[in-house]
Image (cartoon, grey):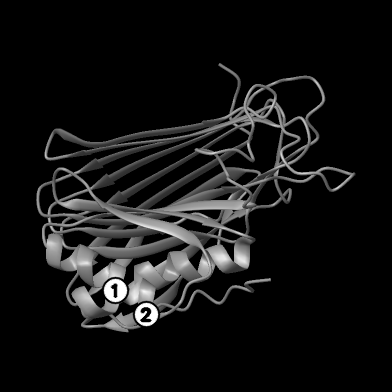
Amino acid sequence: MKEPAGVIELGFQRRGERTVAHKIYHHGNSRVSAGMGIRKYIEVPYYFLISVGGGFIEGETYTASMEVEPEAHAVVTTQAPTYIFKCNNHKQTVQEVDIRIDEQGILEYYADPVIPYKNAYYLQENRIEMAKGSTLIFSDGLTAGWSPDDKPFQYDEVGLKTVIHRDGELVLDDYLICNPKLDDMHGLGYFEGYQAYGSVVIIDDCIDKTVIDGMRDYLEAHHIDCLYGVTKLEKCGLVVRVLGANNHALRSTIFGSINYFREEVKGYDPLALRKNDH
C-alpha cells in the first residue's frame, strides 16, 4: 500500500484531576497544534489537527487515530475545512479516522466541513469504538464545493461514512454519498437549494426524550435560519442534521445544539474554539 501523505496519532489519559495527551505523533503533511485547556472540574485539553498543504490533493490518503483512556476527556477539532483540490484524473482521495473511547472516557471531535473543488473524488471514513459508559460528541459536514465559475456541485463524488460501535454493539452506520453527475443536488432529499450540510452525533447514556425535546426547544427559541432535525437513535444517542445557506449559518446551528448539550445537560463550560466563522 502507498504510504499515507499525512498521519496523526493522539492518546489521552486521566492523571489525577486532569487529562493529558500522553501520545502526540504526526508525520508527513499532517500536524497537531500545541495543547490548550478548557477548565471545568478537571483540566480538559484540546488540540487542532492541521493540514500543512492547505488541503488534500487527489490520490492522497490521510490517517488519524485517537484513543481516550478511562475517565479522560479531550476536545479535538480541525484548524480549517478539509479542501479537496487539484483533482483532474479521477483518483480518489481518502481520509481514515479511527477512534477508541474507554469506559467513562469523553471525546469531543469537531471536524470542519469538507469543501470539494471541481472534479474532486473523496471518501472519508470514521470508525469509532466506544466502551460502555463513554461519551462522544462528533460533528462533520459537506458544502456545495468550489469551482472557477462559482457554480456549486462541480465535484465528481464525495462519501462521508461514520460507523460507531458501543460496548460491542452497532449504534450508528451512516453513509452519505453525493454524486452530482448522477443526482440533482438541488432536489428533494439532497441539498434542496441550500449550500451547506452538517451533522452532529452525540452518544451518551443520559440521552432520552427529555434531552431531545429540550434541544429542539432550544434551537427553535434561537430562531436558527437553517433547515434542521433532531433524531433519537435506537440506543443512547441522537443525531442532528442541518442544511444551511452557508457555513456561518450552519455553524451557528451545529454549535447551538452542541452547547445546549454541553451546558444544559452535562454542566460544562461554554465552548469557544477560537475560529473565524467567516
Q: Quadrant of residue 74?
A: bottom left
Disc 1 to disc 2, C-alpha distance: 6 Å
224 left or right of 166 in image: right
Which residue is at a point 27% across and 79% down the rendered structure image?
A: 263
Amino acid type at mark 1? Asp
Which residue is at a point 72% across and 29% down the rendered structure image?
A: 58
Circle 2 SS class: helix
Considering only vertical position in the picture, is 145 above or below 274? above
Label ID, residue 3: none
Which residue is at a point 63% across and 36% down the rendered structure image?
A: 185
Percent from the top left, x then y, of residue 162? Answer: 38, 37
- The residue that disc 2 covers is 221
Percent from the top left, x then y, of residue 22? Answer: 34, 58
Other-residue count near label 1 (Cα within 10 Å), few / some / many at <14 / 14–19 / ≥20:
few
Q: How many marks?
A: 2
Which residue is at a point 70% across and 24% down the rendered structure image?
A: 181
Other-residue count near label 2 (Cα within 10 Å), few / some / many at <14 / 14–19 / ≥20:
few
Percent from the top left, x then y, of residue 131? Answer: 14, 45
Circle 1 SS class: helix
59 left or right of 30 in image: right
Label ID, residue 217: 1
Amino acid type at mark 2? Ala
